């Protein structure tokens, strides 16, 4: 599957612009890490673009039956596309409840950037100019510490993701911020 095909599939299944933006942000951050680690950017982009493509239609899940998000999406991708298994495993692994261990660097990266991109996006939206260019790491760190801000962002998963990736939390936050700023230019 090409990046354009993945984007088309994501847009087809995700009418909500904020969820679309989230997946695009995860793609950007995952690509940044792919370059950083010398990995395949296309695989990382696919994981970022597709990790929540089923969420809007299938937000609830049943782990025992393996239905709902992300099980539905991975089953759909297995049956209808040629998305590599490493990407599918990463998508399953980004949901802690799936029971899928994050073994590959791709899976660890997807998990590490998923929640954090949401925090960055929320920080951008409260800025008067709604522009990421002026968002500083120090401001992002303050917002991270304030659990009332963007309360839906799971800070424990952000911390766990950085640890699994082997990157200091502050460095990880700076990397994701840099990635998202670079995409906004």
Image (tube, rainbow, N blue to C red):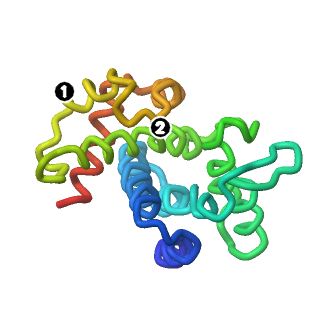
Question: Left or right: 92 with respect to 173?
Answer: right
Q: Secondary structure at mark 1?
A: helix
In depth, the one of 36 and 178 nearer the eye is: 178
- Quadrant (top left, top right, bottom left, bottom right) of the C terminus: bottom left
User: Which residue matches tag 2?
Assistant: 152
Counting from the top left corner in percent of width and height, residue 99 is at: 76, 36
Give neighbour class at mark 2: few <14, some 14-19, many 20+ (Cα, 10 Å). few
Please tell me the numbered disc located at residue 68. none
In depth, the one of 82 and 135 nearer the eye is: 135
Q: Secondary structure at mark 2?
A: loop
- Quadrant (top left, top right, bottom left, bottom right) of the N terminus: bottom right
Q: Residue at x 52, y 30 (%)?
A: 157
Q: Quadrant of residue 33?
A: top left
Camera-nearest label, 2 or 1? 2
- Mark pair 2, 1: CA separation: 21 Å
Question: Left or right: 106 with respect to 125?
Answer: right
Counting from the top left corner in percent of width and height, residue 22 is at: 42, 55
User: Which residue matches tag 1?
Assistant: 138
Q: Residue at x 58, y 72 (%)?
A: 13
Q: Residue at x 63, y 62 (%)?
A: 54
Against 178, residue 57 (above or below) is: below
Counting from the top left corner in percent of width and height, residue 11 is at: 50, 74
Give neighbour class at mark 1: few <14, some 14-19, many 20+ (Cα, 10 Å). few
Against 155, residue 125 (above or below) is: below
């Amino acid at each position: 599957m090409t990046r354009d095909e993945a984007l088309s599939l994501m847009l087809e299944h995700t009418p909500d612009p904020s969820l679309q933006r989230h997946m695009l942000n995860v793609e950007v951050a995952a690509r940044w890490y792919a370059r950083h680690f010398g990995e395949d950017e296309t695989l990382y982009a696919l994981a970022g673009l597709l990790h929540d493509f089923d969420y809007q239609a299938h937000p609830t899940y049943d782990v025992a039956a393996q239905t709902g998000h992300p099980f539905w999406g991975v089953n759909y991708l297995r049956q209808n596309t040629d998305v590599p298994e490493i990407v599918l495993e990463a998508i399953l692994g980004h949901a802690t409840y799936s029971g899928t261990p994050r073994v590959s660097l791709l899976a660890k990266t997807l998990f590490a950037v998923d929640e954090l991109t949401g925090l960055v996006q929320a920080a951008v939206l409260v800025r008067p100019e709604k522009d990421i260019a002026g968002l500083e790491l120090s401001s992002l760190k303050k917002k991270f510490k304030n659990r009332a801000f963007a309360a839906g962002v799971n800070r424990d998963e952000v911390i766990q993701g950085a640890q699994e990736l082997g990157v200091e939390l502050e460095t990880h936050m700076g990397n994701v911020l840099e990635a998202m700023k670079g995409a906004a230019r």
